Image (spheres, rainbow, N blue to C red):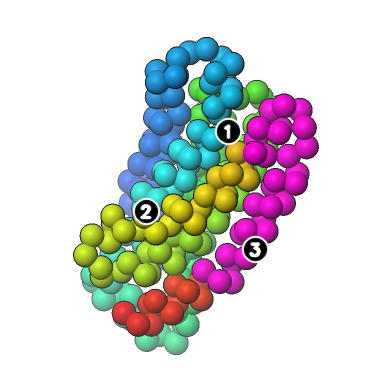
């Protein structure tokens, strides 16, 4: 909890990463009407996939600095020697990433959804899907950031490692939003997203901790 509090305080003192992720998300949503045309039907059909893809890409932006800054100034070595397990360090980093990046993206979802002409009745499903998908990406991204720590071109390798694993979250999340927009039940797809998150919750910190232990 102390490590999580430290990460949140650092994010409040230096909000550039959070602002960049939110602005990227909103700007990508704003660009779609220019790329595919302003027809409301076309935008509404593309909105579910566009929202999930834009949010996950935006959440990737701060990941390359998740462990990098602490590794550069020696903080990471001190954390690993403090008695706190590497998996616990990774879990705290993942939780902080969701709170400082995933949660702001979740709050910006109605703005992006309005730009993409998503029906208002589908907005709660969109926020739920995006929150679950962002949590899943935070866990995957923590493992990816630990694996690429110290690697040359780590910032390039990280998206190539994480994005293919995040495809199921995009599929289930977009399907849930599309179902809600059509007046159908989105709950089965949200449950599948929850299952992905539940599977990653113990496994991703363990993988990240193992990678940090070998650094």
The span picked out in magenta is 175-204
- Depth check: 13 or 71 in front? 71
Q: Quadrant of residue 180?
A: top right
Q: Residues within 10 Å of mark 1 (few under 14, many from 20)?
A: many
Q: Nearer the viewer, residue 30 or 161?
A: 161
Q: Position of residue 31 (x, y in %)?
A: 40, 24
Q: Which residue is mark 1?
A: 48
In percent of width and height, residue 190 lies at 69, 47
Would residue 125 be found to the left or right of residue 141 on screen? right
Q: Earlier in the sequence, mark 1 or mark 2?
A: 1
Give residue 127's quadrant in the image: top right
Decide: few, some or many residues near mark 3? Use Cα within 10 Å; few <14, some 14-19, many ≥20. few
Observer-nearest residue: 192 or 146?
192
Tags 1 and 2 touching, CB below 8 Å: no
| Residue sitting at x 45%, y 38% | 54
- Residue displayed at 72% across by 51% down: 191
**Above or below — where is 83 with respect to 177?**
below
Residue 143 among those drawn in magenta: no
User: Which numbered disc, 1 or 3, marks the residue that appears first in the sequence?
Assistant: 1
Q: Which residue is mark 2?
A: 159
Q: Residue 165 location in percent, x, y?
A: 49, 57
Considering the whole magenta stretch, tell me its main secondary structure.
helix
Q: Residue at x 28, y 56 (%)?
A: 155
Residue position marked by numbered label 3 in the rendering: 198
Give the structural element (helix, strand or loop) at label 3: helix
Residue 194 appears in the rendering? yes
Mark 1 vs mark 3, CA separation in Å: 23 Å
On screen, residue 138 above or below 124? below
């Amino acid at each position: 909890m102390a490590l999580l509090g430290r990460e949140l305080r650092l994010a409040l003192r230096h909000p550039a990463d959070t602002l960049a992720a939110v602005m990227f998300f909103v700007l990508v949503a704003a660009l779609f009407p220019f790329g595919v045309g302003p027809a409301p039907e076309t935008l509404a059909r593309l909105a579910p996939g566009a929202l999930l893809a834009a949010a996950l890409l935006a959440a990737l932006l701060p990941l390359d600095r998740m462990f990098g800054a602490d590794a550069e100034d020696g903080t990471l070595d001190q954390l690993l020697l403090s008695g706190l397990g590497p998996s616990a360090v990774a879990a705290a980093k993942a939780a902080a990433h969701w709170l400082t990046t995933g949660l702001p993206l979740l709050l910006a979802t109605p703005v992006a959804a309005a730009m993409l002409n998503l029906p208002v009745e589908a907005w709660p499903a969109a926020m739920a899907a995006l929150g679950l998908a962002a949590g899943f990406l935070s866990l995957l991204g923590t493992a990816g950031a630990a694996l690429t720590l110290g690697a040359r071109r780590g910032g390039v390798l990280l998206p190539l490692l994480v994005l293919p694993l995040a495809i199921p979250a995009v599929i289930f999340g977009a399907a849930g939003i599309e179902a809600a927009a059509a007046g159908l039940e989105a709950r089965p797809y949200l449950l599948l997203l929850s299952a992905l998150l539940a599977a990653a919750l113990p496994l991703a910190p363990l993988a990240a901790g193992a990678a940090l232990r070998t650094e």
